Image (cartoon, helix red, strand yellow):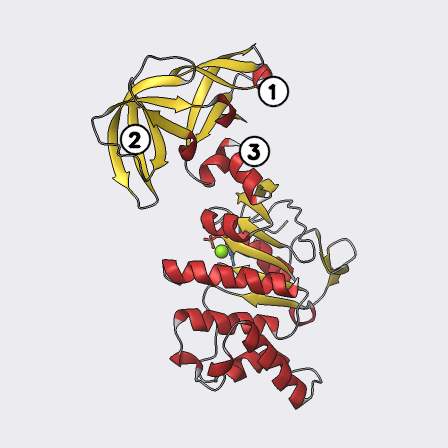
Amino acid sequence: MKTYRGATEPAVKGIDVEVPDGELVTLLGPSGCGKTTTLRCIAGLESPDEGRIRIGGRTVFSSEERIRVPTNRRNTGMVFQSYAIWPHMTVLENVAYPLRVGRISKSEVRQRVNDALDLVGLSELADRPAPNLSGGQQQRVALARALVSEPEVLLFDEPLSNLDAQLRESMRQEIREVQQRLGIAALYVTHDQTEALAISDQVIVMSDGEILDIGPPQRIYERPSSHFVAEFIGLANIFEVADVKEDGGLMTARCDLGTIRFPRDPGALSSDEVSVLVRLEDVSLEAPGPSSENRWPGRIISALFLGTLWDCFVDVDGVRVRAHVPRTAQPKAGDAVTVCIRPEDCVTLLR
Ligand SMILES: Nc1ncnc2c1ncn2[C@@H]1O[C@H](COP(=O)(O)OP(=O)(O)OP(=O)(O)O)[C@@H](O)[C@H]1O
Ligand SMILES: [Mg+2]
């Protein structure tokens, strides 16, 4: 737990995070939810009010045992959003900077810096003044500098948010490859859900200083633990349902569309606060036809071509349903369609 001086609420409440060796875990959550505070506590830049932090089996902070290992002896490597690169130094000098203290021979420093620059593909630019680099190259220098002291854990705080969309994608791939090649533990802060899904072994969804969900990307996307997590990760239709009954191996309930059928979930029977989540790619639009199980007649309000797919809004008796339909379909505003959702693609959320 960490409360900043003068604040009424803790910035980070009782969170429990473990980053196994060789895994990349992301902290994902809206602005102000406590991601940076968590990283800074681990790096030793802030002291929690209470709790315990262990790195590689060693306790670096414990309020109970009164342990507080200083930042420079925690063996972490950090990469920030602003690259924090020294403008008056060359690439090589920047990367060598963390090794300036300690008793490492000149030749070993040179070797380690070369290895780190090799890893991030910057060997050719070693003697270039740091300001004469592109944003992506500067971020690679920052990564090499974080790696050069051979840390036990890498900490990333939104390292890609200053880069343009294309560079962000290629850099996230590079970060993932380097992390896997070294088999190093990494904790990665982002508020970009696509980035989190793409690079993580585990995703932690935070809100208001608390953890709402932890799991592998696919599970978090397909079976989010709550309404908030579902809406934060990806786009979805969420229908509130009532009168839930079990019927023939499935559940049946009322929602704004009419009757909806979804997989058996005993929890849904005992709660009257249930929603059903359907991802946009699980909604299909077929030729007009009569209503039947999980098929509702509607009319396309808008269809935007996004390259890989069409993003459609469909009106079903006053309710808007959003669907991502294949690139090869030819949906047009005004078309009459049948909205189809397979029961097995419905996920129950308890509110
Ligand atoms: N130095 C500080 N002093 C007082 N309050 C702070 C300080 N730093 C952060 N806070 C507060 O603590 C809470 C968590 O902030 P934090 O920076 O950890 O959020 P974050 O999840 O990293 O957000 P963002 O995505 O905007 O970077 C916020 O309410 C913030 O205003
Ligand atoms: Mg932050």
Quadrant in the rendering for residue 294: top left
Mark 1: which secondary structure? helix
Vertical arrangement, residue 223 with respect to residue 88, above or below? above
Q: CA distance from mark 3 to mark 2?
A: 26 Å
Marking on residue 320: none
Mark toward the start of the polypeptide (3 vs 2): 3
Dots 1 and 2: beta carbons under 8 Å?
no
Dots 3 and 2: beta carbons under 8 Å?
no
Q: What residue did someone put label 3 on?
A: 225
Q: What residue did someone put label 2 on?
A: 313
Relative to 44, 208 lies left or right: left
Residue at 56% of width from left, 62% of height from top?
A: 177
**Front label number (1 vs 2):** 2
What residue occupies the far right of the structure in this picture?
A: 65
Task: Report if the beta carbon of the residue with label 2 is closer than 8 angstroms to ligand 1.
Answer: no
Dots 3 and 1: beta carbons under 8 Å?
no
Quadrant in the rendering for residue 311: top left
Quadrant in the rendering for residue 310: top left
Q: Residues within 10 Å of mark 1 (few under 14, many from 20)?
A: few
Q: Residues within 10 Å of mark 2 (few under 14, many from 20)?
A: many
